[in-house]
Amino acid sequence: MDRINSGSLLIAGFIAGYVMYVIDLALEGWFGLFGSYKIYKEWLVQENLFKGYEDIALFIGHQLNSILFGFVFAYIYQYIPGFKLLKGVLFSIGWHILVLIVAFIFGLGGAKWLSGIINMDINQHITLFLLHLFWGTTLAFFYKPMEEKN
């Protein structure tokens, strides 16, 4: 963990999560894509979690996830080939594949939310992939590794 620029990661993770969230909101309905936040909000409503505060809980949870999952990016940053933005794209693709694998394994085991991911329609899968690309690329753009800090 000593090779991770934690301050930079906190900022980059927050910005990347925000960009991903805002793109999902702003482009809702564009060619039948985006607006995936509604799916996650509906899950919270169905489970009666954060009653009346689902939007706030979703945003805060998303931001925390962005920062926490950003640590994976920062940890493996030096091992991802290519220049800075390519690292973000490659990480995004790998991350998306990992999300699908986890959703598939646990979804088949009965995890309701994760089975919901594998059962999404094609437009929602395309949306999730594009949002992961925006997230990872933004994360790479704003993250400054320790070796670049000085």
Image (cartoon, helix red, strand yellow):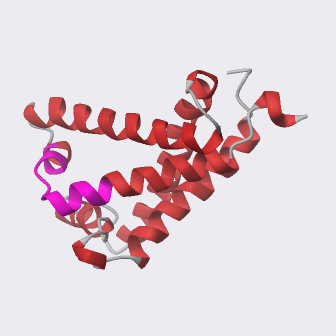
Dividing the picture into quadrants, the one containing residue 114 is top left
Quick one: 119 or 44, which is closer to the camera? Answer: 119
Residue 147 horizontal/vertical position (percent): 80, 27
Q: Is residue 30 above or below residue 94?
A: below
Q: Residue furthest front?
A: 82
Dividing the picture into quadrants, the one containing residue 49 is bottom left
Q: Is residue 44 above or below residue 135?
A: below
Using residue 38 as the reference point, say whether residue 84 is left or right of it. Answer: right
Q: Residue furthest right?
A: 150
Q: Residue at x 15, y 58 (%)?
A: 122
State yes or no: residue 116 in magenta.
yes
Q: Is residue 120 above or below residue 82?
A: below
Quick one: 85 or 135, which is closer to the camera? Answer: 85
Write down the region rendered in magenta: 115-128
Using residue 37 as the reference point, say whether residue 79 is left or right of it. Answer: right
Q: Is residue 31 above or below residue 67?
A: below
Q: Residue at x 61, y 29 (%)?
A: 77
Using residue 7 as the reference point, say whether residue 15 is left or right of it. Answer: left
Q: Residue at x 33, y 51 (%)?
A: 129
User: Which quadrant holds the N terminus?
Assistant: top right
Residue 123 horizontal/vertical position (percent): 19, 63
Using residue 29 as the reference point, say whether residue 107 is left or right of it. Answer: left
* Main secondary structure along the magenta-highlighted residues: helix
Q: Residue at x 69, y 51 (%)?
A: 11
User: Which quadrant holds the C terminus?
Assistant: top right
Residue 81 horizontal/vertical position (percent): 56, 27
State yes or no: residue 103 in magenta.
no
Tag count: 0
